[in-house]
Amino acid sequence: MIRRRHLFAGLSLLSVGSAVAASPATTPLHLPMPRSGRLLPLGGLELDTSSWGFGGLSGLNLAPDLTLTAICDRGRWWRAPLRLESGRLAGLGEASFGPLRDGRGTPFAQGTQADAESLARLPNGDWLVGMERTHRILRYRDLAGPSQPFDAPPGLEAAPRNGGLEALTLLADGRLLAVAEGLAGSDPESRAAWIGTFQGARPIWQRTEYRPAPGLEPTDAAALPQGGALMLERRFSLFGGFSARLAHLPAAALAGAAPLTAETWLELPPDAPAENWEGVATVRHGGRTLVALISDDNQNPFQRTLLLLYAIA
């Protein structure tokens, strides 16, 4: 997450239970054909988040019924169904949202305990939420309910305060992939990563490393149904603004001991608008693999919450 000036309103709505808002106002976005030829654009939307009172969406999940779930860096969860018309993104249905809670069921106070950045769902329906600043993973049976602690990768506590677990996903083979944004691997250009293999309900983590494109940092990961994963990476500079890429990490790379590297499938821009891209999700639906991306507007009036949808070619 990148911290800039925040615009944050309406939190009183979220302090107790969950709330429901009507379908948000959306503005269609035109998406060109990506130059890699790996993805087919199915449409994009700019979302008006004012009806929720918050933005800052990150850590994305897309269910087989096309329900989109995200978390927010101010300790919130958000959910809405995608609406497709003739196979293309047409809008969102009614949104629901609420606060993330601690083990006693108390909503997190704003601050270092509430910075939710990554999201994964286990086969039994439980949710894993990667938290930054106070680095940890929380497990939820229901995102609206209390949390339980979940074993975090060893060494994650050494990550910079604002460079923790941005990427967390359940791979097709049942293992977990976790990548830290700001914790270096064996050299300054790589980032600490871990593969978690379950023994019962607990993961056994093995350290590896991920090598993003030069100048970029990992911000999310999404497992592919056929194996491997998609990695989302982002760059920000004061004068250059935002840029990002979506890259393919093959299943074979996740089986070896070498540093993980990925092939670019999408460049943002020119393949899609420049923004603070922080969430990616995949799902198998209607005989094709869909890929959704969402941007974190930092709750800043000069940024946008954008949602993109693609199908793997």
Image (cartoon, grey):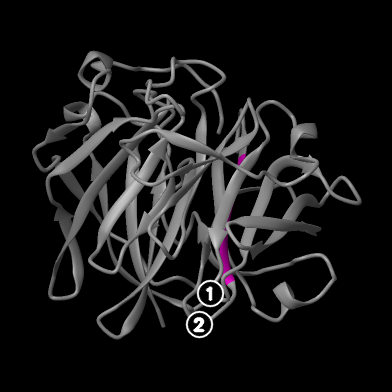
- Amino acid type shown at disc 1: Ala
- The numbered mark, 1 or 2, whose residue comes first in the sequence reads 1
Whether residue 284 sits left or right of residue 45 in the image: it is right
Q: Secondary structure at mark 2?
A: loop
The label number, if any, that marks residue 276 in the structure image: none
Extreme residue toward the bottom, this view: 287
C-beta proximity under 8 Å, tags 1 and 2? yes
Q: Which residue is mark 2?
A: 226
Mark 2 packing: few (<14 Cα in 10 Å), some, or many (20+)?
few
Say which quarter of the image contains residue 10: top left
In the rendered image, is residue 234 in sight? no
Tell whether position 232 is magenta: yes
Q: How many residues crowd around disc 1 within 10 Å: few (fewer than 14), some, or many (20 or more)?
A: some
Q: Residue at x 64, y 63 (%)?
A: 198
Q: Residue at x 61, y 62 (%)?
A: 200
The image position of residue 82, as x and y in percent, is 20, 58
Question: Residue 58 vs residue 218: left or right?
Answer: left
Q: Amino acid at mark 2?
A: Gln
Q: Is residue 291 above or below residue 296?
A: below
Boundaries of the magenta span: 229-235
In the picture provided, is 20 more to the left or to the right than 311?
left
The residue sitting at 48% across, 78% down in the picture is 38
**Residue picked out by circle 1:** 172
Q: Is residue 310 visible?
A: yes
Q: Position of residue 5 (x, y in %)?
A: 46, 16
Residue at the left extreme?
Answer: 22
Q: In the rendered view, would you say 264 is above or below 301? A: below
Residue 10 is one of the magenta-drawn residues: no
Picture coordinates of residue 122, whole percent (x, y): 46, 60
Q: Which quarter of the rendered picture does the N terminus lie within?
A: top right
Q: Residue at x 72, y 58 (%)?
A: 204
Q: Nearer the viewer, mark 1 or mark 2?
A: 1
